[in-house]
Image (cartoon, rainbow, N blue to C red):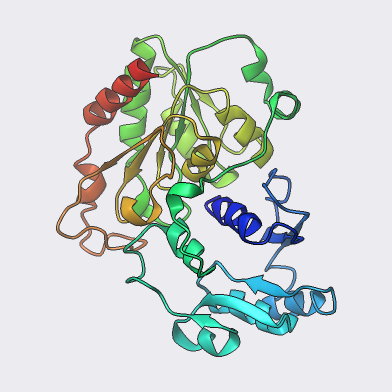
């Protein structure tokens, strides 16, 4: 989702350009801004190199490589597109033309700013916010049934973290939080992928009054759902980035990652971050085996922060 800010900057830099975006298969129905065509890629079905070869002789002048992986650079190299712009690190620099050096230490500035610096045009992230192109017709077409039943004080929780447990606030804390909201007359929706169904089941128990939609909605239905909630509380995750693109109220909980680098670029966002001496480590699992960066973030603290945001909004 953060790459949508880059798409907007790309359009400003090249007003007449035809812009296509390669996305992970399953995300091609997301209404991205500024693009002519969205091309799905499934690494389980085709290699990065073979996919890149499919892009040959299609008239592309430039390939901007936003992911830091070697495979993304290999895809670009295999396409034979003349200008392959991405960051130089490791062996992938040999595949790029040009290979761009970081202006600052990696992860020391916001990821969106790192993307913008690839354009070498002195653009600032304050000019460009993430965005998805949704309107009321699109929302009505994609909204899940339970949210069609009139006005409800819905809040959303997104407890999942595909990156690893070091970014996941404890599930028992989410359950405690949900029960607190229920006592205040606030309804909670738990959102996530099929892999997070068990998390949703634990959180949405009989005492919580919550609705568990984990694994029960498409990506477009998830986006439509987020347009209807008053607040999203989430780990530093994909759904947090979606809410930032919608520019709606969100509370994001940071553990092993850094809000300086991946915090929601959204004026309606607040983050909670303990900033311990060991943080950010950017590891998938806590190397010290305690996960205090998240376990010391008590449900009461998150509950009070959420109530303040609800009162303001």
At 78% from the left and 54% from the top, the residue drawn is 36
Q: Say if 286 sits above or below 152 in the image.
A: below
Q: Residue furthest left?
A: 277
Q: Does residue 180 appear anywhere in the picture?
A: yes
At 77% from the left and 73% from the top, the residue drawn is 60
Q: Nearer the viewer, residue 97 or 48?
A: 97
**Percent position of residue 113, x then y:** 44, 59
Q: Nearer the viewer, residue 220 or 211?
A: 220
Q: Say if 143 sits above or below 47 in the image.
A: above
**Percent position of residue 101, x then y:** 43, 79
**Residue 123 falls left or right of residue 43:** left
Q: Does residue 218 appear anywhere in the picture?
A: no
**Percent position of residue 37, x then y:** 78, 55
Q: Quadrant of residue 90?
A: bottom left
Q: Say if 172 sits above or below 93 in the image.
A: above
At 44% from the left and 82% from the top, the residue drawn is 89
Q: Quadrant of residue 16?
A: bottom right
């Amino acid at each position: 989702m953060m790459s949508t800010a880059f798409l907007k900057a790309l359009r400003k830099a090249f007003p007449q350009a035809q812009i296509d975006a390669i996305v992970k298969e399953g995300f091609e129905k997301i209404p991205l801004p500024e693009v002519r065509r969205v091309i799905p890629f499934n690494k389980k079905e085709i290699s990065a190199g073979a996919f890149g070869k499919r892009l040959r002789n299609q008239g592309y002048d430039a390939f901007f490589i936003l992911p830091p992986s070697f495979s993304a650079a290999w895809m670009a190299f295999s396409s034979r597109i003349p200008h392959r712009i991405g960051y130089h690190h490791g062996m992938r620099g040999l595949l790029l033309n040009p290979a761009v050096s970081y202006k600052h230490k990696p992860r020391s500035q916001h990821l969106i700013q790192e993307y913008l610096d690839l354009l070498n045009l002195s653009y600032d992230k304050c000019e460009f916010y993430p965005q998805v192109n949704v309107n009321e017709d699109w929302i009505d077409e994609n909204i899940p049934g339970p949210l069609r039943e009139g006005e409800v004080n819905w809040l959303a929780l997104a407890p999942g973290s595909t990156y690893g447990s070091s970014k996941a606030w404890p599930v028992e804390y989410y359950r405690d939080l949900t029960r607190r909201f229920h006592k205040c007359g606030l309804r909670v929706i738990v959102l996530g992928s099929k892999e997070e169904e068990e998390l949703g089941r634990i959180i949405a128990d009989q005492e919580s009054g919550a609705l568990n939609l984990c694994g029960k909605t498409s990506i477009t239905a998830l986006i439509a759902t987020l347009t209807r909630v008053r607040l999203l509380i989430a780990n530093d995750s994909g759904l947090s980035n979606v809410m930032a693109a919608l520019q709606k109220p969100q509370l994001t909980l940071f553990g092993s990652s850094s809000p300086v680098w991946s915090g929601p670029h959204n004026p309606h966002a607040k983050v909670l971050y303990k900033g311990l001496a060991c943080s950010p480590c950017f590891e998938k699992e806590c190397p010290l085996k305690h996960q205090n960066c998240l376990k010391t973030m008590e449900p009461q603290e998150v509950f009070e922060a959420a109530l303040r945001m609800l009162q303001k909004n």
